Amino acid sequence: MTFEAQGVSLRDPGVVPTRYWHRLEDGRVQCDVCPRFCKLHEGQRGLCFVRARVENQIVSTTFGRSSGFCVDPIEKKPLNHFLPGTPVLSFGTAGCNLACKFCQNWDMSKSREMDTLMDAADPETLARAAERLGCRSVAYTYNDPVIFLEYAVETAKVCRPRGIRSVAVTAGYVTAEPRRELFQWMDAANVDLKGFSDDFYQRLCGGHLQPVLDTLVYLKHETRVWLELTTLLIPGENDSSEEIEAMTRWVVKELGPEVPMHFTAFHPAWKMMETPPTPHATLTRARRIAMENGVRYAYVGNVHDPQGESTYCHQCGQVLVGRDGYVLSTWHLTADGRCDRCGTACAGVFEARPGQWGGRRQPVRLASHSA
């Protein structure tokens, strides 16, 4: 699937050249950022909509342009083991390189209108805003940083010297070389493992499972990026006990028992408005299966469940980080991230004290933070 790239010009500061593409013998140019490998004639956009062929090269059309900026709790990404309680400056662009029929952010990820990009900020302005707002990190989220890789990487590069971490919220649908470039600048990632069958990925996402698994193995074993996983459980599609068994066994075997898993509730959206919401019992069943299979940190999300949202010591069972929604209720970690009862280390990136941001969501206009 392609789209016309009308009005796209290299004279536009939001349009920048990219690296990951090559020319084909038939005259088309192939984008190599993700496994879709869109093959474009002059003036066409790829399925993601934001990468296009202009003047015989692939360009990114959303550099410095966002669908909005917001300060969120880090737990909303969701990341439960990365600087708990701290605020994160979140932003995304438009478009997506998957075509999920159940997309929960469809107004941004499925947008084909550039006026969705209502706010603008260069990387320096973003880093300055994060610093002034007291954010410990910046999250590249809402759609997927894979498709705005150049913007995400340049922002991370200017954030790092300021001590501001970078967080990728991604479906992990990316090829090897751009994957290396993106994640060498990331400090944490939540990867959306949408299901555990190729049939699910093909029918409901327009993609394939294996490239996502490759990304997960790469992140765990070849980087220092803190990794957590999220699976949106959709009734009748990816919520069977058999699929959850297979998924969680694979995670423990290939990634390790310390990788947190979040099982979140589906709500009718986009092209699946007739599918019912996920029952709470489905989430608790998935969490139980994960823990029985050796996952040390399993969570439920998109529902109110303080027990299923909290972090427990896998050795003695004490509540380490109590949560009620996005609000931290208890804290039993030592300054070096250990259970204060038995001394067992809790996997993650922790500071001596938890953040106090709570559940607030604060929209931000970046214009007030320009130099």
Image: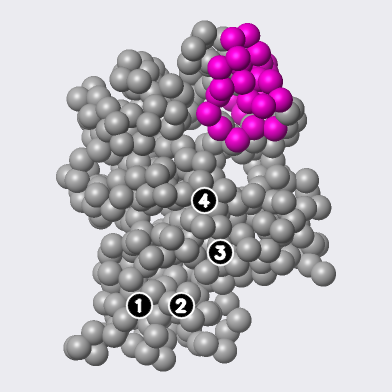
Q: Amino acid at mark 2?
A: Thr
Label placed on residue 168: 4
Picture quadrant where residue 22 is located = bottom left
Confirm or deny contact between disc 3 and disc 1 (CB under 8 A): no
- Residue at point 23%, 84% (across, down): 24
Label placed on residue 18: 2
- Please identify the dominant SS of the magenta region: loop
Label placed on residue 153: 3
* 3D distance between C-alphas at marks 4 and 1: 22 Å
| Among numbered discs 4 and 1, the one appearing first in the sequence | 1
Q: Tell me the quarter of the image containing the N terminus.
A: bottom left
| Among numbered discs 4 and 3, the one appearing first in the sequence | 3
Label placed on residue 21: 1
Label 2, secondary structure: give it. Answer: loop
Crowding near pointer 2: few (<14 within 10 Å), some, many (20+)?
some
Picture quadrant where residue 356 is located = top right
Label 3, secondary structure: give it. Answer: helix
